[in-house]
Each structure stands twice: as structure tokens, then as C-alpha cells.
Image (cartoon, rainbow, N blue to C red):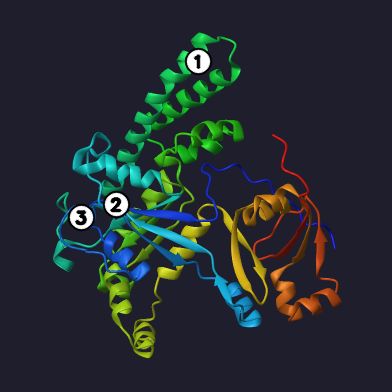
């Protein structure tokens, strides 16, 4: 079999670890807290009031994965650890949030701590739900403009505060090449933001590499975070899969945020489903209206926004998902388990999940030659079942 062709992927902003978080962001009264409630099965106040969620509520949501479920069924482990997405319900932003309006500075700091952003945008009218809109009439494109502008303004502030530091370094040492390159990256990024564009789209435009990425990562810029758009519809509109704003929102995202995911859903309908204790009645309702809950799609899409995949370790003691960014070589994957695994890496013993599924067991994989030994250059594939051999005999040299 020919070796797997390695596709060179462009570098990404951000440094997600094994614990991934996403912030629900939007104007007040667009359905963020209701969405959070149904995503996380928690009971956060969702009142008709702009700042009912002042402190961010946080909960972990299991990332749906049939492969993990199959491994657990096979091994019946004492411990089961799936991939998790931490969801943060961030209070509504308003115009002027970057300057402190509406407690905006605190809210923006909460966004800064997340790895990705879920923009919740409302396409239901007040007459449909009785929930007022803080900006008056429903206009999702205006709402997206407001939120995106506030995030950009905050990023501009961060860069404007950093540029004088670089200028001082260059003044002290005119030959400081690193400082000069950092200053050039910051100035280019600032102009990009002033043009009304989000930082994450500058990477491909300027063909930046890890050097520029590292400069921007230090600032944890808000518009550098990958984003997804959750279009919150009224229940009747969701059930008939029609809304006068959907096409316009799609066109807006395609123009301003090309390639980013958009998921229409109804927080109102999802809350109704969540309140139904009878699983049979819940399924009957879905069949009747020929729709599905969109929550699994939201969670799974949100997790993969960050170009994340996971490998498994599996046995009678534990089946566990380990999160890595694609592509990742075997030593780096081993390092997510323990730094010693990466430092003393010898080899990875690997079964591709599909091979394991077809064979039915680890022993049968070995018998058919599908249990492989891989070295330091192996690129871990999504769903690989891995066991690492390592040897650390002394402390790492400083």
C-alpha cells in the first residue's frame, strides 16, 4: 500500500489544548442562554433583560462520536472519557462594548479566554415570541455588523497598545530583526482590521507562517478565533424550514466570513424537546415534523472548527479521546498524554479505527497485519487507536 499522502495545511491562529472551549456571543435577547440551557442541560436564567447573564456560565458537552461508543461497548472499561467541548454563555454585547458600554470590557475578556466563537443571531420577530429586540426591529445583518465591529475595535485597541512596545525595542536596538518583523506584522494586521476584516482571514491572504502566527497568538485577538453562526429561528419557521432572513444571512456570511459554518436552528423548539421526558414522544414529534435536533451538529461542528481531531487509547481500564490539531506527528500526540511520552518517544503502536472495526478485535488486527508500528514521522489520523512506547532515563537538559 502506498504511504498516505500528507497534505500541507496552512497554520492556524490559536493554541487549543486537550480542553476546548467555545463562547456563545451575540446581542442581548437573541437566545444565547436558552441555547446554552439546551446544549448543556443546565438551568441558567433566560429572562427578557439585556444583562441577565453577567457572569459567564460554563458547562462541558460531550462531542458525539460513534467510534468512541463502539470502543466502550467492546472494552467495557472502568473509565470512559469522551472528547468534551466546554461551552461558555457570555452576556449580550451592545454597541460600544469595546469602550466599556454595558459592562462590555468584562464580557470581551470572557470571549478572549475561549478557543472559538459561536455567533448566535436572531431571525425571529418580537410578535412571534414576545421577546423584544434591544436594537428595535429584527435585522440579523445589522446585529452581525455590531458584534463583529465590537470585536474588531477591541483587537485594534490591543494592537495599538502593543505597537509602542515594539517601537521602543527597535529604538533601543535598531538591529533587532525579531522586533522589526513583529512590528511589521502588527501594523499590517491593524490596517486589515481598520478595513473591516477579521484577523483570521488575513493568514491566507498574506500567506503568513508560524513566525507571524506566534506574534498574533500572544495578543489572543478576538477576531482571530474561528467562528460559527447559529441562526435562531422561531419554532414555526424552523418546522417549515423557511425564514425570510435565512438567504440574506447566508449571503452575509459568505461575503464577510467565507468558508465558515452556518446552522439554522430553533432554541425554542430545542427547549421543547429537552423538556420532554418520554424519549418515544420526543422521537415521534421529530418524525411528525420531519426534522432533527440540531444540537449534535452544533457541538460536533464547533469542535472541528479548530481543525481538531482525536485519537483513542483503549483498554479494560479506560477508553479515552485525546484531542490534537491536524496534522500532528506521533510524538506530539504522545505528548498530550504526558510530556515524558513525547520526550522519550520510541514508537507508536497504531490501529486505524476502520481496521479495528472490520477485524473485530486487537488480536485479529495483529493477525491480519493491521496492527502497525510507527515512528516519529507518522502523522496521526483521526480515530487512530494508539499505544505509545517511550523511555525517559534522565531529566531533560535545560
Element type at mark 2: loop
Which is more toward the observer, 231 or 85? Answer: 85
Return the x and y of residue 243 as percentages of the image width and height. 29, 64
Question: Distance between the Cα atoms at labels 1 and 2?
Answer: 38 Å
Labels 1 and 3 touching (C-beta < 8 A):
no
The residue drawn where x is 28% and y is 77% is 272
Which is more toward the observer, 112 or 201? Answer: 112
Question: Distance between the Cα atoms at labels 3 and 2?
Answer: 13 Å
Labels 3 and 2 touching (C-beta < 8 A):
no
Provide the residue designation for mark 3. Answer: 138
Which is more toward the observer, 94 or 350? Answer: 350
Provide the residue designation for mark 1. Answer: 169
Residue 94 relative to residue 318: left or right? left
Element type at mark 3: loop
Return the x and y of residue 355 as percentages of the image width and height. 75, 73
Q: Count residues near mark 3 (Cα–Cα under 10 Å), then give few for <14, some for 14-19, many for 20+.
A: some
**Sequence-wise first label, 3 or 2:** 2
Q: Is residue 70 above or below residue 349?
A: below
**Sequence-wise first label, 1 or 2:** 2
Q: Could you tell me if residue 209 is visible in this image?
A: no
Which is more toward the observer, 294 or 271? Answer: 271
The residue drawn where x is 39% and y is 77% is 291
Q: Could you tell me if residue 298 is visible in this image?
A: yes
Amino acid at each position: 500500500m502506498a504511504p498516505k499522502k500528507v497534505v500541507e495545511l496552512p497554520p492556524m491562529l490559536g493554541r487549543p489544548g486537550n480542553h476546548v472551549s467555545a463562547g456563545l456571543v451575540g446581542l442581548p435577547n437573541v437566545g444565547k442562554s436558552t441555547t446554552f440551557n439546551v446544549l448543556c442541560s443546565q438551568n441558567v436564567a433566560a429572562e427578557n433583560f439585556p444583562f441577565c447573564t453577567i457572569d459567564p456560565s460554563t458547562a462541558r458537552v460531550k462531542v458525539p462520536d460513534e467510534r468512541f461508543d463502539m470502543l466502550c461497548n467492546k472494552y467495557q472499561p472502568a473509565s470512559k472519557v469522551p472528547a468534551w467541548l466546554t461551552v461558555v454563555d457570555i452576556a449580550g454585547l451592545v454597541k460600544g462594548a469595546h469602550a466599556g458600554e454595558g459592562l462590555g470590557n468584562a464580557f470581551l475578556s470572557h470571549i478572549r479566554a475561549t478557543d472559538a466563537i459561536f455567533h448566535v443571531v436572531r431571525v425571529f420577530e418580537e410578535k412571534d415570541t414576545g421577546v423584544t429586540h434591544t436594537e428595535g426591529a429584527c435585522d440579523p445583518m445589522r446585529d452581525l455588523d455590531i458584534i463583529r465591529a465590537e470585536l474588531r475595535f477591541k483587537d485594534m485597541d490591543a494592537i495599538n497598545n502593543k505597537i509602542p512596545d515594539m517601537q521602543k525595542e527597535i529604538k533601543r536596538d535598531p538591529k533587532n530583526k525579531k522586533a522589526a518583523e513583529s512590528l511589521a506584522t502588527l501594523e499590517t494586521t491593524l490596517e486589515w482590521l481598520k478595513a473591516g476584516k477579521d484577523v483570521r482571514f488575513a493568514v491566507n491572504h498574506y500567506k503568513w507562517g508560524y513566525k507571524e502566527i506566534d506574534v498574533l497568538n500572544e495578543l489572543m485577538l478576538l477576531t482571530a478565533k474561528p467562528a460559527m453562526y447559529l441562526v435562531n429561528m422561531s419554532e414555526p419557521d424552523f418546522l417549515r424550514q423557511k425564514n425570510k432572513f435565512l438567504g440574506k444571512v447566508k449571503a452575509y456570511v459568505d461575503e464577510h466570513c467565507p468558508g465558515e459554518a452556518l446552522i439554522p436552528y430553533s432554541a425554542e423548539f430545542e427547549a421543547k424537546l429537552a423538556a420532554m421526558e418520554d424519549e418515544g414522544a420526543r422521537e415521534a414529534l421529530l418524525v411528525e415534523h420531519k426534522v432533527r435536533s440540531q444540537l449534535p451538529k452544533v457541538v460536533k461542528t464547533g469542535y472541528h472548527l479548530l481543525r481538531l481531531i482525536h485519537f483513542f487509547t483503549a483498554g479494560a481500564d479506560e477508553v479515552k479521546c485525546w484531542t490534537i490539531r491536524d496534522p500532528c506527528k506521533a510524538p506530539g500526540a504522545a505528548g498530550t498524554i504526558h510530556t515524558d511520552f513525547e520526550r522519550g518517544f520510541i514508537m507508536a503502536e497504531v490501529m486505524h479505527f476502520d481496521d479495528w472495526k472490520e477485524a473485530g478485535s486487537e488480536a485479529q488486527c495483529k493477525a491480519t497485519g493491521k496492527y502497525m508500528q510507527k515512528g516519529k514521522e507518522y502523522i496521526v489520523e483521526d480515530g487512530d487507536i494508539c499505544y505509545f512506547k517511550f523511555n525517559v532515563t534522565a531529566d531533560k537538559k535545560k
